[in-house]
């Protein structure tokens, strides 16, 4: 009788452990959104979303995507700061980075990610040569494009998204230093690792064109490559992570990887066939980030609230672009439905253990 009782207890304990594993998610801040559109500033009257994040000397920084209600939908980057990670104030009433009407990024500057080397901040940001228009009124993933002659480069005719780099010493004044990725590719979600690994810089990117048998993936995936100088990325990319679960029809990188004792923590998004965005996590080898050590089967963040389901995008979007670790707490800053900034948190040690236990 005792053996049967003990076996039952064991089964129940295992069931509870499995249930706990599956249900672990980042904890959303009850005061979300932490940053909302400001009707007093035309350039951010409709959108404040997808923020890069940095923490230093007791201050949290958010470099957020901002746009107004203009038909062209010009997109900028603004700055807000906080001392507690939840209550943010804008630093100034104008953008810190804006499209150059006569430059390569004339259409938009958006979805920044920030790392630091020495005393300089390096910000990757997505851009387009022409404004995207009010894309949320179109079919999914369709933006406006200019009417150009057939002789114009395809990247201009199709208003292809790409990625550039800007450098700053104070997170306010930035120097644009140019394009990072191949102009023939739709290549966004470009993220730098925050330190050199074996004397090389590493980059995550999501070339939308890399699909089909040649690339060993049928949908857009996350690729990784290295560079000796951060500006020249001639080394061939390696396929790092592609969609495998039902919620990962296509995938892309989200936040700069963070060093932990168990590996580089990398957050990524999965998009299902109904266009809903969710968040997954993995750990990469500290010495060779082309190797995935652990990867969650289950997502750790999904659209649940009204602002996450009923912003510009109606099908549900949570899209992190910044994360920091402060006193064992991971702060994940994300865009809600392309319109608001939000934050969710987790104990970093608990999250790392969950990734290891919930691995594929």
Image (tube, rainbow, N blue to C red):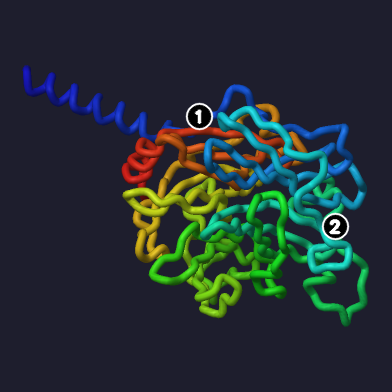
Please, is residue 340 above or below residue 289 in the view?
Answer: above
Q: Earlier in the sequence, mark 2 or mark 1?
A: 1
- Does any portion of residue 90 appear in the rendered image? yes
Q: Residue at x 66, y 74 (%)?
A: 182
- Residue 347 x/y as whole percent: 41, 34
Q: Nearer the viewer, residue 9 or 91?
A: 91
Q: Nearer the viewer, residue 102 or 148?
A: 102
- Residue 333 x/y as whole percent: 59, 39
Please state if 212 lies on the left or on the right of 175 as rendered: left
Looking at the rendered image, the quarter that the N terminus falls into is top left
Q: Residue at x 76, y 53 (%)?
A: 97
Q: What is the distance, in whole Å, between disc 2 and disc 1 at their CAs?
A: 35 Å
Q: Which mark is residue 27?
A: 1
- Residue 2 x/y as whole percent: 6, 18
- Residue 309 x/y as whole percent: 69, 33
Q: Which mark is residue 272?
A: none
Q: Residues within 10 Å of mark 2 (few under 14, many from 20)?
A: many
Please, is residue 323 above or below residue 169 in the view?
Answer: above
- Does any portion of residue 251 appear in the rendered image? no
Please state if 155 lies on the left or on the right of 264 as rendered: right
Q: Which mark is residue 131?
A: 2
Question: What SS does tag 2 mark?
Answer: loop
Please, is residue 188 above or below residue 78 in the view?
Answer: below
Locate residue 276: give its quadrant.
top right
């Amino acid at each position: 009788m005792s053996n049967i009782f003990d076996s039952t207890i064991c089964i129940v304990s295992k069931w509870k452990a499995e249930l706990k594993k599956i249900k672990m998610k980042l904890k959303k801040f009850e005061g979300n959104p932490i940053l909302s559109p400001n009707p007093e500033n035309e350039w951010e009257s409709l959108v404040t979303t997808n923020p890069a994040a940095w923490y230093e000397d007791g201050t949290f920084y958010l470099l957020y995507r901002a746009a107004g209600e203009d038909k062209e939908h010009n997109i900028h980057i603004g700055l807000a700061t906080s001392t507690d990670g939840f209550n943010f104030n804008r630093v100034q009433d104008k953008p810190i980075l804006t499209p150059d009407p006569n430059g390569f990024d004339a259409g938009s500057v958006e979805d920044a990610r920030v790392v630091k080397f020495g005393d300089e901040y390096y910000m990757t940001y997505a851009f387009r040569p022409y404004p995207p228009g009010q894309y949320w009124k179109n079919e999914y993933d369709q933006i406006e494009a200019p009417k150009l002659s057939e002789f114009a480069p395809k990247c201009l005719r199709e208003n292809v998204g790409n990625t550039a780099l800007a450098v700053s010493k104070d997170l306010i004044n930035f120097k644009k230093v140019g394009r990072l990725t191949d102009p023939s590719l739709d290549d966004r979600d470009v993220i730098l690792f925050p330190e050199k690994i074996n004397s090389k810089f590493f980059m995550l990117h999501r070339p939308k064109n890399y699909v089909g048998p040649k690339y060993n993936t049928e949908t857009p995936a996350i690729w990784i490559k290295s560079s000796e100088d951060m500006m020249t990325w001639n080394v061939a990319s390696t396929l790092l992570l592609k969609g495998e679960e039902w919620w990962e029809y296509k995938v892309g990188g989200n936040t700069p990887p963070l060093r932990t004792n168990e590996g580089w923590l990398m957050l990524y998004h999965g998009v299902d066939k109904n266009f809903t965005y969710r968040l997954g996590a993995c750990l990469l080898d500290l010495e060779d980030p082309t190797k995935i050590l652990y990867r969650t089967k289950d997502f750790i963040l999904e659209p649940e609230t009204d602002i996450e389901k009923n912003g510009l995008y109606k099908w549900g979007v949570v899209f992190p672009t910044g994360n920091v670790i402060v006193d064992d707490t991971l702060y994940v800053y994300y865009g809600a439905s392309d319109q608001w900034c939000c934050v969710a948190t987790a104990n970093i040690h608990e999250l790392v253990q969950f990734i290891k236990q919930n691995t594929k």
